[in-house]
Structures are given as C-alpha cells and as structure tokens.
Image (cartoon, rainbow, N blue to C red):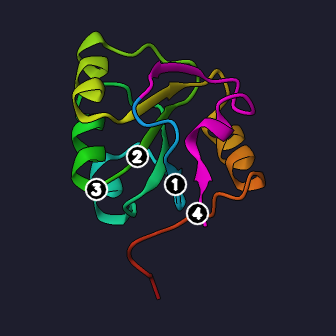
Amino acid sequence: MGVKIGEFVEPLQAEILVEGKMGEEVEGGYCGDLLSDCIANAEENSVWVTVQSHPNVVAVATLVGIRCIVVANGQEVQEQTLEKAREQEITLLRTPLSSFEAVAILSRLGVPGKKRRVTK
C-alpha cells in the first residue's frame, strides 16, 4: 500500500508546479541528483527527490515510471521542464527544504526508500 502524492504536498511545504495525477499512490522513494544513477536504481511508481530541474529529469522519470518529482532547495524550474511534465502527466513539486529534510518527511509519512538493484 502506497502513499498518495497529494498527502505529502503540505508536509513538504511544496509548491505544485505541475499537478499530474495527484491522487496516485507512490510505493517508494528515491533520492539522487545523477540522472544515470536514477535510471539504474529508482523503481517504478516512486517519488524522486532531486535538486535537478532541467527537462531531462522528466525524460528520466518517464523512462523509469516515476510518478512524482520533488525539486528540493527551492531550485528554479525551467518552463520547458514544466511543459514536459504536463505532457507526461508527471507531478512536479518544488520544496524549499533540502533533499535530506524532504526524504526524512517522506519516510515519516510511510514512503519507503526503494532501490531496483540490490548491492552485496
């Protein structure tokens, strides 16, 4: 059982930049700023916390099946990023919190950290 995207907007002090599908649930979370790392490790149906805000984050989210991107540290988000998120119906939030703070809040709300690959 996941956590609905709309349930973490207020706790994250997030601004909804692109509404996407706010009623959908995420089953896990991933945090990282390297796009290739996210592609290799993030799971489908996740929320992704990052400071990256250029259009390629939406391409990565689409490829992986990420439902929501949380841009941390109040980073500015390019209009082209917003347009791509709208096209793909991916929820895009911006929080003034650090990535660390955002992940701590998501964890308290019941979003587990998930990783596709298991390292030994």
- Rounded to the nearest angstrom, the CA distance separating label 1 from label 2 is 7 Å
Residue for badge 4: 113
Is 10 colored magenta in this rendering? Answer: yes
Front position among marks 1 and 3: 1
Magenta part of the chain: 1-19
- Rounded to the nearest angstrom, the CA distance separating label 1 from label 4 is 11 Å
> Which of the numbered marks, if any, corresponds to residue 26?
1
From the viewer's side, name the closer residue of 65 and 53.
65
Local packing at callout 1 (Cα closer than 10 Å; few below 14, some 14-19, many 20+) is: many
Front position among marks 1 and 4: 1
Q: Earlier in the sequence, mark 1 or mark 4?
A: 1
- Rounded to the nearest angstrom, the CA distance separating label 4 from label 2 is 15 Å
From the viewer's side, name the closer residue of 11 and 38.
11
> Which of the numbered marks, if any, corresponds to residue 92?
none
As drawn, which residue projects farthest toward the front?
23
**In contact (CB < 8 Å): disc 1 and disc 3:** no
Instruction: Give, as a three-letter code, the residue at label 3.
Output: Val
Instruction: Give, as a three-letter code, the residue at label 4.
Output: Gly
Instruction: Give, as a three-letter code, the residue at label 2.
Output: Arg
**Residue 75, image x and y in percent?**
49, 18
Q: Earlier in the sequence, mark 1 or mark 3?
A: 1
**In contact (CB < 8 Å): disc 1 and disc 2:** yes
Residue for badge 3: 64
Look at 43% across and 37% down and name the residue there: 21
- Rounded to the nearest angstrom, the CA distance separating label 3 from label 2 is 9 Å
Instruction: Give, as a three-letter code, the residue at label 1.
Output: Val
Q: Tell me the SS state at disc 4.
A: loop
